[in-house]
């Protein structure tokens, strides 16, 4: 079968690899669409994936075309979205319900071959059957939405909060859509990309600007979310948190990224600084939210490119062009 392969840091090719074989509790998915994510760029840089080469792609959906010998929950022809998270279920973190922090954490498309291919293998337990009205090519959005849902689980934000989001790429826009539905009284968005800001405005943010200075809230925001992973945005965002407010590090930074905080300010103003790592008990809820129309795929997906164009798709994504880019095998 044809697949994209990150062979070494900075090197990605589209080549032929062996067809996948399911284990007893696995299914084979004929991939309909696979989304690109910042994690894929980190893997290309030599981060995250423990070994290379690897077939990337952890945001994917498709049709079941192969069943393991012990699979009874799905049938051939079922259309599914796939939660890529793989846990050991044995370590301390799995046992206390923090599976996303598993000591042996793995993920389809990160540590084992993923969905940037014609076919992919997934455990049946990781597959969510899609309702008929969902276009399976749009369902690649469910995985990033499940990460956003996890972010709001961590926030546990109260009604009437003023929210500031840094970044209006796919994840920032998803956080905007969820903030609007979780009782925020205002949701402001900052980005240095005017084209992306225009999309945030289209989706109904309260205010938008190239800098938080343009937004006029001198007391700060109750909730500040970084959806960029950019050091300058993070540093600025930490200074914008109101008293008793929360800063959520949601964007994925490079390993070397640092920021400076004032321990006295954290103490004196009771500021919470927290993070959100991937998916935790949120994939099925994200699938239901997606089926209920929480996102408009025509707004979120800006590019649909062929698998042969995967290297160019990564370049476009790295350049900050478009919103969600999906490859269609």
Image (cartoon, rainbow, N blue to C red):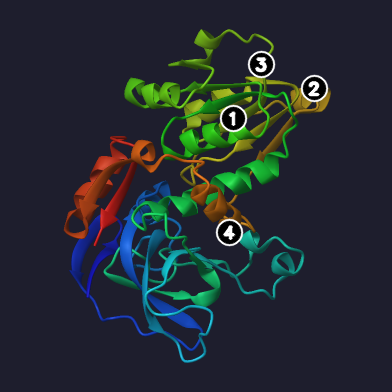
From the viewer's side, name the closer residue of 303 and 203.
Answer: 203
Residue 23 to residue 86: above or below: below
In the rendered view, tell whether residue 120 sits above or below residue 116: below
Disc on res. 220: 3
Find disc 4 in the rendering and name its residue.
284
For the residues marked 1 and 3, what is the alpha-carbon distance in whole angstroms? 19 Å
Measured in 3D between alpha carbons, the distance from the residue under mark 3 to the one under mark 2, in whole angstroms, is 12 Å
Q: Nearer the viewer, mark 1 or mark 3?
A: 1
Cα separation, mark 1 vs mark 4, equals 20 Å
Disc 4: CA contacts within 10 A as few (<14), some (14-19) or many (>=20): some
* Marks 4 and 2 in Cβ contact (< 8 Å): no
Cα–Cα span, label 1 and label 2: 26 Å
Q: What element does badge 1 sit on? A: helix
Q: Nearer the viewer, mark 3 or mark 2?
A: 3
Question: Label 4 near label 1: C-beta < 8 Å?
Answer: no
The percent coordinates of residue 6 (x first, y second) are 29, 62
Is residue 264 left or right of 34 when viewed as pictured?
Answer: right
Percent from the top left, x then y, of residue 160?
A: 72, 23
The residues bearing labels 4 and 2 have C-alpha atoms spaced at a distance of 36 Å
Nearest to the eye among marks 4 and 2: give it. 4
Q: Is residue 306 left or right of residue 214?
A: left
Disc number at residue 180? 1
Mark 3–mark 4 Cα distance, whole angstroms, equals: 34 Å
The structure residue drawn at horizontal position 38% and vertical position 56%, both measured from the top left corner, is: 43
Q: Quadrant of residue 99?
A: bottom right
SS category of the residue bearing label 3: loop
SS of the residue under disc 4: helix
Q: Mark 1, residues whose alpha carbon is within 10 Å: few (<14), some, or many (≥20)?
A: some
Q: Earlier in the sequence, mark 3 or mark 4?
A: 3
| Depicted 300 relative to depicted 307: above or below | above
């Amino acid at each position: 079968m044809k697949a994209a392969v990150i062979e070494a840091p900075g090197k990605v090719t589209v080549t032929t690899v062996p067809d996948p074989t399911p284990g007893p509790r696995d299914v084979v998915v004929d991939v309909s669409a696979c989304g690109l994510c910042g994690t894929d760029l980190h893997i290309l840089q030599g981060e995250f994936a423990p070994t290379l080469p690897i077939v990337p792609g952890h945001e994917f959906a498709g049709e079941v075309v192969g069943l393991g010998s012990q699979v009874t929950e799905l049938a051939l022809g079922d259309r599914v979205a796939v939660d890529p998270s793989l846990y050991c279920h044995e370590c301390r973190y799995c046992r206390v319900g923090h599976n996303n922090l598993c000591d042996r954490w793995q993920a389809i498309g990160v540590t084992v071959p993923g969905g940037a291919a014609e076919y992919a293998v997934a455990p049946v337990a990781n597959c969510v059957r899609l309702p008929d009205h969902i276009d399976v090519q749009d369902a690649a959005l469910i995985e990033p939405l499940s990460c956003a849902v996890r972010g709001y689980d961590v926030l546990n934000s109260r009604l009437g909060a003023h929210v500031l989001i840094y970044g209006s790429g796919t994840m920032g826009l998803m956080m905007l859509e969820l903030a609007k539905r979780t009782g925020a009284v205002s949701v402001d968005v900052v980005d240095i990309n005017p084209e992306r800001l225009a999309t945030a405005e289209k989706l109904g943010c309260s205010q938008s600007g190239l800098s938080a200075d343009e937004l006029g809230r001198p007391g700060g925001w109750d909730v500040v979310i970084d959806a960029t992973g950019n050091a300058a945005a993070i540093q600025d965002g930490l200074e914008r948190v109101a008293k008793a407010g929360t800063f959520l590090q949601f964007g994925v930074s490079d390993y070397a990224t640092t920021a400076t905080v004032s321990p006295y300010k954290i103490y004196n103003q009771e500021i919470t600084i927290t993070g959100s790592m991937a998916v935790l008990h949120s994939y099925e809820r994200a699938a239901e939210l997606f089926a209920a129309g929480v996102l408009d795929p025509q707004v979120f997906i800006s590019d649909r490119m062929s698998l042969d164009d995967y290297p160019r798709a990564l370049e476009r994504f790295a350049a900050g062009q478009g919103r969600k880019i999906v490859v269609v095998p």
